[in-house]
Amino acid sequence: MRAVVQRVSRAKVTVDGEITGEIGLGLLVLLGVGQADTEADAAYLAEKISGLRIFEDDQGKMNRSVQDVGGSVLAVSQFTLYGDVRRGKRPSFDAAAAPEKARELYEIFVQRVRALGLRCETGRFREMMTVESVNEGPVTILLDSSRAF
């Protein structure tokens, strides 16, 4: 699984004019699921993201997690994180998981984040979404459950 994690002061996702998820201080997580991913990948990323120390402490050092600052998570499924443009300009999504598997692992990720005590809002799987965010810092972290980067 791949994730783009942004530290935000606020974020929301809208589908057909309806807000499906909205947070204040916290993390916007764009989450992609690959063909080889398993429940263990979802659990790994949920744990890793919930503990990322990317919020500033009293000395201005990134030393606090979203849990430490009482923040929330907005998780948005984004299969395009598996877009491969190495052989041209039109992305290939062959490495992305099939929709059924991707939905299952996305939902497991959300459940695991919630089980860790965090409020986790969501987008709507396989829908055209509008995502708005205010990235603080800016701070953006890339994660891959296979530890490719």
Image: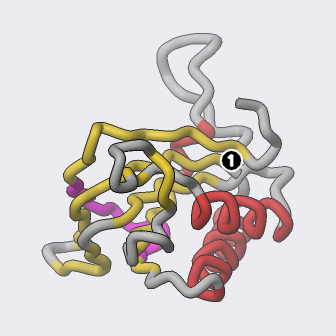
Q: Amino acid at mark 1?
A: Ala
Q: Is residue 123 visible?
A: no
> Which residue is rendered at x = 60% and y = 52% of the image?
32
Q: Position of residue 109 (x, y in %)?
A: 65, 72
Under tag 1, what secondary structure? loop
Q: Position of residue 13 (x, y in %)?
A: 27, 67
Q: Is-magenta flag for residue 126?
A: yes
Q: Position of residue 68 (x, y in %)?
A: 47, 71
Number of numbered tags placed on the structure image: 1
Q: Give the quadrant of residue 62.
A: top left
Q: How is the image coloured?
A: secondary structure
Residue 31 lies left or right of residue 47; in this view the side is: left
The quarter of the picture where the C terminus appears is: top right
Q: Is residue 79 above or below residue 18?
A: above
Q: Give the quadrant of residue 71.
A: bottom left
Q: Give the quadrant of residue 84.
A: top right
Residue 61 lies left or right of residue 130; in this view the side is: right
- For the view shown, which residue lies furthest in the front direction? 59
How many C-alpha atoms fall within 10 Å of the one at disc 1: few (<14), some, or many (≥20)? many
Q: Is residue 138 visible?
A: yes
> Which residue is rendered at x = 67% and y = 58% of the image?
48
Residue 75 lies left or right of residue 58; in this view the side is: right
The foreground one among 63 and 1 is: 63
Residue 127 lies left or right of residue 132; in this view the side is: right
* Span of residues in magenta: 122-133
> Which residue is rendered at x = 73% and y = 50% of the image?
34
Q: Position of residue 21 (x, y in %)?
A: 31, 78
The foreground one among 73 and 117 is: 117
The residue where tag 1 is placed is 96
Q: Is residue 58 above or below residue 81?
A: below
Q: Is-magenta flag for residue 33?
A: no
> Which residue is rendered at x = 79% and y = 60% of the image?
41
